[in-house]
Each structure stands twice: as C-alpha cells, then as structure tokens.
Amino acid sequence: MIKLGEKIKSLRKQKNISQEVLANYLGVSFQAVSKWENDSTMPDVTMIPALASFFGVSTDELFDFNLFEMEKQVEAICKEAYKYRDTDEAKAEKILREGLQRFPGNDIILNNLLYTLDYKTRADEVINLCKTLIESTKDDSVKYDACRILALCYKENGQYDLVKPALEKIPEIYFTKLELMATLLNDEDRYMAAQKQKNISAESLIDMLIIIGKHLQENGESEKARSQFKIAGKVIDAFAEDFLENRLFHSTVYENTRDQRNEIEQLLEN
C-alpha cells in the first residue's frame, strides 16, 4: 500500500505545483511538506481535511476523511461569518480563523477571510493570500475573486501598474451563472437566483453610470455627464420601494447605495 508521503508527492506533481505552493496553501513551511513526502514525519491530523480538499481525492485515500461532510461544515462556518461581515468584521474574521484551525488552508474559508481584511493596513497579508489562492485553488470562482480583490488592493495602495495585470487574469464573460439559473430553472431556484442577480446588476449599473459620468465631466462634456448622473439617481430612487429578501441580504439596494446618492448630489452641483 502506498505511503501517505508518497501519495502527497504524487498528487502534488499531478497538479504541477511546488512544495512551496502547497506549504503556503496549508500555512506550513516547505520543509514540513518535504518531510511529509519523505515520510520523515506525518502531517498533523488537522491538515488532513485541507489536503483532501486541496487535491480533490477520494476520502479513502487520505485517512478515510469524508470530503462531503467537510464541505458542509465549511459552508456553515462561512455562513455564520457572513452574518457579521458588514457589522463586525473582527467577529467575522475570528469565526473564519477558528474555521481555519479545523480546516487549515481551506480555499473557501480563505476566500471569505479576504472580505474581513483591510486593504490598507493589512495589504501584505491580502496580497500574499490572493496570490496563494490564484496559484493553488481548483475553484475558478475563488481564483477569479482573488484576482479581483488583488487588483482592488493594488489600487488602494497606489500600485496602479499592477492593477491591470491582475485583472487580465479574469476571463471576459458576458453572462453569469445566476442569470442562467434565473432563466432556465423553475420555482424557488429561479426566484432566488433572480433576486441575487437583480441586486448585483442594479448596484453595478449605478457604479458604471457614475464612472462614465465622471469621465465625460473630466473631458468637458458636462451635459452628457449630467445625463449619466441623473440616470444613476433615478435607478437608485426606483429601488426605494423595493423589499428586503431577508434570506439573501442584510439590506436593500436603496440602503446599500447611500454613498452613491450623496456622491451623485455633489456631482450634479458641480
């Protein structure tokens, strides 16, 4: 029977990654990974779930760990942290950190953790975590979200020359999974997908109108700029009567766009 160290080495080579990448994902030194692969030492038992998840192997191959059960527990951890993401980032981070103690290096938890970290004061941590996820995760949604957050972090810290290369890692897609679910599914699945996409689309549209307006304004096309700002204001006002779907959101589009409303008022005064 193949030894665990040999199995880890074989799976790592199949993914074509270095010991350093695997070590960064798990939060250990590359020397530790080397010792595992040489069967000099065994991974701590807390590393087994992360290894199974990372390599996507059957549960029988790594200490008979139940991967499906792990995914359910990870989802529960992230849902609990999400409750506090907007109101108490420190508490949300604490929940996720505790989750990582149970499931070291889990890419879903790490992706959620990025939303609790301040891009200014903890830039190095954000950048390193994004790079690790981009290189190691097998989940495309995690990878491209990490690319997006990496670009945001670069911009927040004035590293403008690095923003575009980070964004270019994200493929151009003209439809979303939620749009397809809302169009092709039925009943509750269709409704929930449409609700999520509605909010995403509305907030994105408002942001795009403001960006276009600012560009026009900077280029001396004030009337065209005002038209974009007014449209953005009307979109926001249209959501004043919208209801909150408590199963999905903590606030409505109208409540979420308070800053944009104030910005639009100031822009129209100029």
Image (cartoon, grey):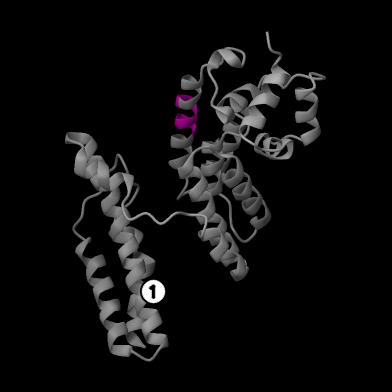
Task: Say above or below: 85 vs 69.
Answer: below
| Residue 137 located left or right of residue 75 | right
Q: Residue at x 64, y 36 (%)?
A: 16
Q: What residue is at 29 percent from the left and 42 percent from the top?
A: 246
Q: Quadrant of residue 184?
A: top left
Residue drawn at point x = 47 percent, y = 46 percent: 85
Where residue 4 appears, as percent x and y from the top left, is 70, 17
Closer to the camera in the image, 239 or 167 = 167
- Return the x and y of residue 255 as percentages of the image width and height: 32, 59
Q: Is residue 4 visible?
A: yes
Q: Position of residue 134 (x, y in %)?
A: 57, 47
Q: Which residue is mark 1?
A: 211
Q: Is residue 115 visible?
A: no
Picture quadrant where residue 264 is located = bottom left
Q: Residue furthest top?
A: 1
Instruction: Please state which of residues 152 and 54 is positioned toward the viewer in this rendering.
Output: 54
The part of the chain drawn in magenta is 72-77
Residue depicted at 71% across the width and 38% down the height: 18
Q: Label 1 neighbourhood size at 10 Å, few (<14), some (14-19), many (20+)?
A: some
Quadrant in the picture for residue 104: top right
Identity, as a three-letter code, of the amino acid under mark 1: Ile
Q: Main secondary structure of the magenta part?
A: helix
